[in-house]
Image: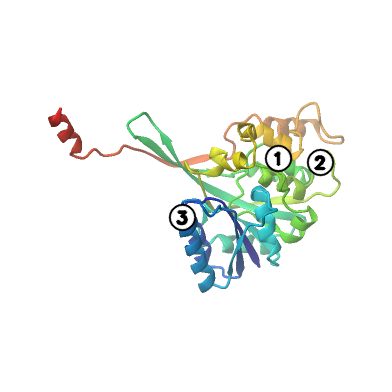
Amino acid sequence: MFDVIIPIHKTQPEFLKECIDSVINQDFKDFQCYMVDGTPAEWEGYKENREYLNEIVSTDERFHYHVENEECNYAGGARNQAISYGSHEYLVVLDSDDWLENNHLSIMKEAILEEINPNVAIWFGIVSHFIKIPLGQNGTYERRRTLMNRYYDLQFIHPNHHSLFLNTTITYPVGMVMKRSEFERAGGYDDTFPIGEDSQILVSVLGNPFEDKVFRQVRLVDECSANYRTHENQTTQKGEQLKEGGHNDYEKYMNYDTKRELIGLPTATLDNKLPFVDEQYWKWLVSLDQIKNRGYLVVDKEIVTPTRGWEHLLEKEEE
């Protein structure tokens, strides 16, 4: 039923293992997993990751490991390559430093089977976001868990405007499911995008209301079964893949407005209202872009202060 797609690029071994183990442990077993690795062989964690992945593919025939083709560009190219190896009807998007709960595929399967609208092409769920926020200079930090993608106002959006709605906010595609047929109709990921290819594929599949005549919809699955990780070695946080691609102005690509410009879908404004659209509805759609932290809910946080051992007492005596 599912092809799970995982691009890999300089992923910390402990994160990669947690990601792959979360797929292995799914309680729904009808899937294949395609991993495409663009990590340079000289990278410090390459050998450990390669040994682990070789062990997985040798013991579980559902898992397939491929080295990224030379002509591949960025994460979009790696995803396209991985998808080309499979044939299942539904694609599951997962980055190699994120992970799924054991029931994620079961939840998505039920949502797909219960769907009565043939124009729904994408399903996404609530995502947990784990982050550490430094506080001061003594190593103290806030550990926070936030639920994201809680976009319940999606139900009020016109069927042809789903891409516009998603363009007003950040959608986290961890564990997102797409129909393969719709992905192929859209031409796959645009691998010329150094960043933001996940937003680009949403617009390509759902349709641009300012230009297109074919539209599809997304469905929010009101379950939290996927986890997004932010960490100091995250390549998109550091812009490493952009630097490697020769983008000296890589910081520009980290800007959300730049991503919107790249995907070619204007933000809804009072000046570009589509014809035959209710004015009050359009004003509401425009207002969504002004609401900060839409769809976010902090559910757990704590302040963590590193404990000091007895070593600092010795240092004081020596002084």
Q: According to the image, label 3 marks what residue?
A: 13
Of callouts 3 and 2, which one flags the residue occurring earlier in the amino acid sequence? 3
The residue that disc 1 covers is: 165
The answer to whether 276 is drawn above or below residue 13 in the figure is above
Circles 1, 3 touching at the beta carbon (< 8 Å): no
Does label 2 or label 1 sit earlier along the sequence? Answer: 1
Percent x, y for residue 177? 65, 56
Q: CA distance from mark 1 to mark 3?
A: 36 Å
Work out whether residue 273 or residue 258 is closer to the camera in this orientation and state it.
258
Horizontal relation, residue 207 to residue 259: left or right:
right
Seen from the viewer's position, the closer of residues 50 and 258 is: 50
Q: Examine the image and state in which quarter residue 310 appears.
A: top left
The secondary structure type at the circle numbered 1 is helix
N-terminal-most mark, 1 or 3: 3
Residue at image location 49% in from the left, 68% down from the top: 55
- In x, y percent, where is residue 276? 87, 36
**Kind of residue at badge 3:** Pro
- Counting labels gives 3
Depth check: give the residue in front, 134 or 179: 134
Q: Position of residue 130 (x, y in %)?
A: 47, 45
